[in-house]
Amino acid sequence: MFGLTRVVGVAALLAGLTGCVLSPQVIELNEQADVGTGQLSSERNALVRVLDDRGVDDDLIGYRGGRLPENSPLVAEVPLYTTLTKRLKNTLAELGFGGNSTVELLKLQLDINTFEYSCNEGVVVSKCAFELKLTVSVLDGPSHFSKPYQLSESRSVVASPVASYNEEWVNEALDKIWAHIFSDQELLAALGVTR
């Protein structure tokens, strides 16, 4: 009887230590960003392109950690480039782009270099991080502007975050880097926007 109790106890301990594989999560990214209005030097339209340079699935944001993190992805509801293209067009409209202009189109490209969420691997998830690296390029006739922007955050957690927490965090981080990008005076000058 003592042997059976010991075996059951060891089996229960091992089951507890191996942990569970976390389920995948799907989150929605905001297509809107409030960057404030701007004034263009002349009425103009822009051609927008977003490229995902990460070399991973276009909806993958990262992994939730835990045991076998590769089986616990955090993904966007729609591909990142789709959401960021809409977000970029909405932002340019706020800044004054659009209308029926005969002036040559300004070309704006956003490269997604890094868009990565991660949590520690192991039985207990206690630390998560989110890193963003985006490059914005403006082509205006013979003028060319390109600049990288980045943001890196980490948080201590008591357990693997739920989807609503991750959605809020990723959207807040995206809002922060977006505000940083579109308050950059060098970029605004390249776009021909004054505030």
Image (cartoon, rainbow, N blue to C red):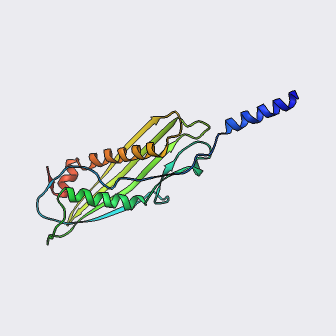
**Front residue of this view, candidates 81 and 152:** 81
**Residue lying furthest bottom:** 102
Q: Judge from the rendering whether residue 15 lies leftward or rightward of residue 127; answer left or right.
A: right
Give the vertical position of 17 relative to 179 (above or below).
above
**Residue lying furthest front:** 1
**Res 180 → quadrant:** top left
**Front residue of this view, candidates 139 and 117:** 117
Q: Judge from the rendering whether residue 13 lies leftward or rightward of residue 110; answer left or right.
A: right
Give the residue at x 19% y 57%. Answer: 191
Give the residue at x 88% y 29%. Answer: 1
**Front residue of this view, candidates 103 and 97:** 97
**Front residue of this view, candidates 72 and 183:** 72
**Residue lying furthest left:** 41
**Res 6 → quadrant:** top right
Q: Position of residue 77 (x, y in %)?
A: 44, 57
Q: Position of residue 99 (x, y in %)?
A: 16, 67
